[in-house]
Image (cartoon, rainbow, N blue to C red):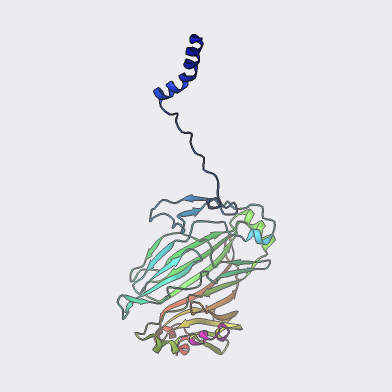
Amino acid sequence: VLAFVLIFLILAGYPYLMRLIQGPPPEAPVTAAADSTAVVADLDEPARVPVESDQAASAPDETGFQEIPVEADTNPTNATEALAFVSGASGETVHVRTPLYQIDIDTRGGRIIRWLGLEFGHHEGGNVQLVPGEYPERGSDRVLFRGGDLDLGAAPYQADQPRLELRSGSGPATLTLTAETAGGLEVRKIFTFRPDVYGIEVDMVVAAPTEAARSALNLTGSPETFRFGWNQGIVPTERVERMEVPNMRAVAKIGEDLHTKKRQDLNKSVDKVTGQWTGSAHYAGVQSRYFTAMGIVPQEEGTPIEGTIRLSGDEETLAQSWAIDLPADRGVGDEIAVARLDYFIGPQDAELLQAYGRGLEKSMD
């Protein structure tokens, strides 16, 4: 009997003795259960990759990620697909400096987002800045095809150079922005700067550089109209802003008629500053007491161009805007359609405006 008791004690106590010698077993890894607060990737969102913190790299969005470019669709089935932009890098800023001014151009939409007058000091220090800090998110440029519209307000342009500087006495210089559609069409916005004048020539081009792009025209039809727009408004420069606001307005010259819309009426309703006119298009612009940002329709051999001018505004930012629709002309080479508008951004100086020979000085308030 004693032998059986000893055997029982040995068998029952062995595991306990071994635990005392070896210590407790390691804990199994804990697998976190999914809960409602977990962050997961949205499958409807484009794929994103981290962007290194490098000022020379493309600017990341607020999340620190950048969209991966999508390859062009070589077989679009309708105009909407053919005119969709191939996604590209997020907007970058191109810096342009001449002896008279310095401007920044956002490649997203190809808009001028900063204009410094280097000959004009500001009462708060530095130079006069004409573009407001707040303006509508998208620009108003557009190409109207026979079979669909191409909105360029946030076009993902790529610039041929990040910086451009012109010195006094030098020749003109150009900046070319290019964006590609899924159908292979290219939209080019070409700025031509001259060192000693405030005028800037802006050419809009639609090109079909490949056979696939030319085939896409069967879906879109030919480009018929280019819309040039400025919806950034203009900044008052007086020390006492309320003294200048009554002078701020938008203007449009169609035929022999000069139309004006006061900015202070934008406080009542956007309808108060909205208008549209069609005929012999001359110019449109926004004005403060001393400065202006205008679009001037070129005339070949004095022949007026039929177009449409729109004036409007944005109630949230109190920015007035203008847009000019011009007919598309035939280009050269792979350019299937082109149009040009001359910009004048600078002081409302009667002598400078008279040089255009278009009666711009008569628009001064």
From this view, report whether residue 311 is shown above or below residue 216. Answer: below
Let me know if residue 306 appears in the view: no
* Numbered range of the magenta stretch: 264-272
The residue depicted at 49 percent of the width and 39 percent of the height is: 30
Q: Main secondary structure of the magenta part?
A: helix
Residue 72 position in % (x across, y down) = 59, 53
Q: Name the residue at 44% across, 61% down.
A: 92
Viewer-nearest residue: 68 or 216: 68
Residue 225: say if magenta.
no
Answer whether residue 267 is magenta in the image. Answer: yes
In the figure, is residue 196 to the left or right of 248?
A: left
* Between 51 and 329, the one nearer to me in the picture: 51
Residue 146 seen from this side: yes
Query: Is 285 placed left or right of 150 in the picture?
Result: left
Could you say which is closer to the camera, residue 138 or residue 349? 138
The percent position of residue 284, horizontal first and vertical second, equals: 52, 81
